[in-house]
Image (spheres, rainbow, N blue to C red):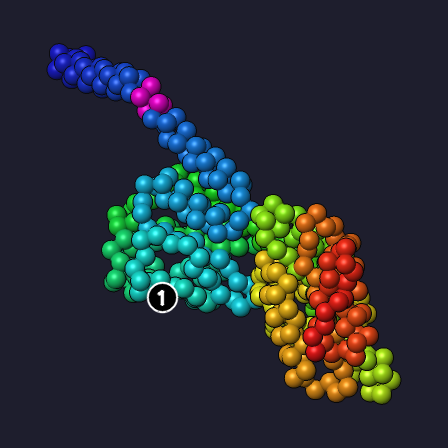
Amino acid sequence: MSFDELREQLKITAAQLQAARDQISELKQQLRDYPEQLEQKVKERTRELEAINRIAATVSRSLNLDEILKDSLEKALEFLELGVGAIFLVDERKGELDLMVHRGFSNDLVSRLQVSPIDSGWPGSVARDGKPLLIEDGGGAGLEGIAEARANNSEFKSLVGIPLKSKGRVRGVLCVCSPEKNRFTREELNVLVTVGGEIGVAIENAWLYEKSYAYSKKMEELSITDSLTGLFNRRHFYRRLKEEIARARRQHHPVSLLVVDLDNLKDYNDRRGHLKGDEALRGVAQAITASIRQDVDTGYRYGGDEFAVILPYSDEREGEVVAGRIRETFAGFAFPDTGLSLGLAQLEPDEEVDSLVSRADTAMYVAKNSGGNRVCRAGKKKHGPGLDADE
């Protein structure tokens, strides 16, 4: 091998050695940086998991739909350190998306997105496809409403839409917006998709609870309501009267009781039929409802052709005014040869439920036996009831 050839070979070897030294130096730098990079990745992953746990805990602690939606949007924006977003709910029956909660939207945008069809627009595309939607600066031109949103809202440089799913069905859409280009990272999208499932389940649970609660309330109402007249029934009457008497004693206010009887119902049924008789009974209920204070006084179908009215905060004099008003209101209806006999009693000190009912009931019979269609006030317990009647 010649000297020149040897020199060239040495140059190559030196270059290779330098390359090896550079690689070793780079590896050393990577090793020095690795703990810091690892620590950064751990911090990012911890932040993501904390956000998921925080939102999951928030939505799972309530069955109130409004609270779930408000808290979910707040936590999602807090995680992303952004201030503009919204949650839409799917109305499958109408094929619409309803804007339920929002932050940072202009009034014009809220007006246009308040109710939007699922088959168009950018929120609708998420609901239809059931997939996340990421729109960066200049993207989404084919989606209805994006251009208008960007024209009036600088926050729409970047937008992400997340389906809120439960049992494979989209229950709503979470939208978050940013004024920065390429704002959302893949990791953030993964977090939003995960919490979207949690929010979707919470929405469904809230809906189920509301349906169950409404059904329970309906069943409760049916159990304490007279089906013919719509007034409360006899069982609820005694429960409510006990409560009002206990309250009156605690607060030292008067309570009066009316017992109302429809005069001549049997003859009216015989002449006109039971359907007409039922109309007359409903007429009594209407007269009672129209004559008493809403949310204070309460009317009941006591049994057959008898009714009762509990009058909290009313003494005998005020009760007599209500009784007269009920009788006059019923008299204005088209039920000839009928009328109302009313017995009125005011609660006495230390008087029990049965005694009060008995005095009012006896006073009603005194009114009925005195010709009917009149109000009779019950006397004191020691003097006997039914001593004073007014036509």
Answer yes or no: is residue 58 visible.
yes
Residue 335, above or below 307: below
Residue 304: name its quadrant. bottom right
Dot 1 falls on a residue whose secondary structure is: helix
Q: Position of residue 98 (x, y in %)?
A: 46, 62
Q: Is residue 343 left or right of residue 45?
A: right
Residue at (43% x, 66% y) in the render: 116
Question: Residue 278, image x and y in percent?
Answer: 78, 78
Depth check, front residue: 59 or 231: 231
Quarter location, residue 9: top left
Q: Which quadrant is home to the C terminus?
A: bottom right
Q: In this figure, which residue is indicated by the disc labeled 1?
A: 111
Judge by depth and name the residue closer to the eye, 195 or 371: 371
Range drawn in magenta = 34-39
> How many discs mark residues in the rendered view?
1
Nearer-the-camera pick, 281 or 20: 281
| Residue drawn at point x = 43 percent, y = 49 percent | 70
Res. 194 in view: no
* Quarter of the image that includes the N terminus: top left
The amino acid type found where label 1 is placed reads Ser
